[in-house]
Amino acid sequence: MMPAASPVFHSRIGRALLSIVVPVFNEEDAVAPFIAHLQPHIPADQVDYEIIFVNDGSRDGTLGALRGLLTLHPQIRIIDLTRNFGKEAAMSAGLDTARGDAVIVIDVDLQEPPELIAPMIARWREGFDVVYGQRVSRASDGFLKRHTAGGFYKLFNRLSPSKIPEDVGDFRLMDRRVVEALKLLPERVRFMKGLFAWVGFKSVAIEFERQPRHAGTTKFNYWRLWNFALDGITSFSTVPLRIWTYFGLAIAALSFLYGAFIVLRTLFLGIDMPGYASLSAAVLFLGGVQLIGLGVIGEYLGRVYMEVKRRPVYLAAAVYEAPPDEHEAP
Ligand code: UDP
Ligand code: MG
């Protein structure tokens, strides 16, 4: 039951249009089983739907497979990007194109169960703007992935004012208003987990067991994950830039005290044997620290440079959809 004081959203009472956004990159073996598994789980008695595949520059037969499916399922739309722009950009392309009152983002590899779609819609109809999937365990990930991911979430949430819930991926339902809010954010580096958190709105989690990939392989190696983590932290926190002031102050204060100590010691005890080992250690250490500081500034400067160029987040080469006469009007 909806509490009496809740705002009323008409799209959530009557028949709604649901958009399902699916980014795909080299997934020729995964798309057909995905559709077969997905369709029975869409509550077609409650919603009309469109399935938006964003082909993120696949180099295998993914586009052919998708176009084959389009002839069977007129609800499909395919946005074919001109090259691989990355999952974040592909999701943005899907959200820009989606027309639904509610939009669900889901991976094509069935790691995120379509069984959750109906419960997500139910929560949305109760008045939640965001219903996100939260994994109960990371058993399907390896030891290293589990620990690096956990460490990243902790670090991110310490540094960033907008917190991201742990073990939550991109799999979620969003109300139209949330999608419109995301579209207002102009940045090129689209760290979606952070943007989802930044826009806020009334959110609720649904727990699920993350499945092993049913076809194909993961597209994220550790180098890509590391860069993804850098994107996330630099997009949402300036702490790494600001700590150098405090670090410098601490070192300057300690150096001053140490200098005073040496002067006094020389006055009272005379000149000691000169030791250049400690001297070179201190110089090299400080040189290293300064280079790290410069590197951090460079990291942010590079990102500022990329942002000010204002290049588009993605480019679409073509959009494929069923001809209007075959397509059931939503
Ligand atoms: N994906 C994408 N572009 C990329 C990398 C991945 O569109 O550059 C898609 C991929 O096809 C899949 C989803 O993003 O639908 C999640 O990718 P994956 O399963 O490889 O990630 P993991 O589950 O291993 O984190
Ligand atoms: Mg996956």
Image: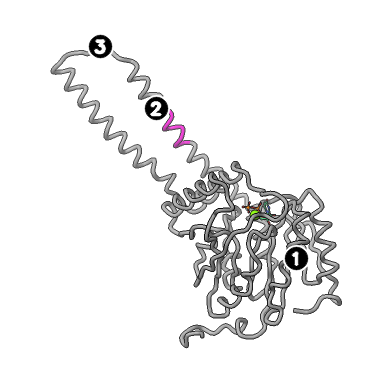
**Please, is residue 63 above or below residue 174 in the view?**
above
Q: Which kind of residue does numbered mark 3 sit on?
A: Met
Task: Magenta stretch: give its range.
Answer: 287-294
Q: Secondary structure at mark 2?
A: helix
Res 198 label? none
Res 285 label? 2
Residue 145 versus residue 261: which sits nearer the camera?
145
Residue to which mark 3 is pinned: 273
- Quick one: label 1 or label 2, which is nearer the N terminus? 1
Res 35 label? 1
Residue 298 in the image, given as x and y percentages of width and height:
51, 39
Q: Is residue 313 in view from this perspective?
A: no
Residue 59 in the image, given as x and y percentages of width and height:
78, 48
Q: Which kind of residue does numbered mark 2 sit on?
A: Phe
Marks 1,2: beta carbons within 8 A: no
Distance, label 1 to label 3, CA atoms, is 78 Å
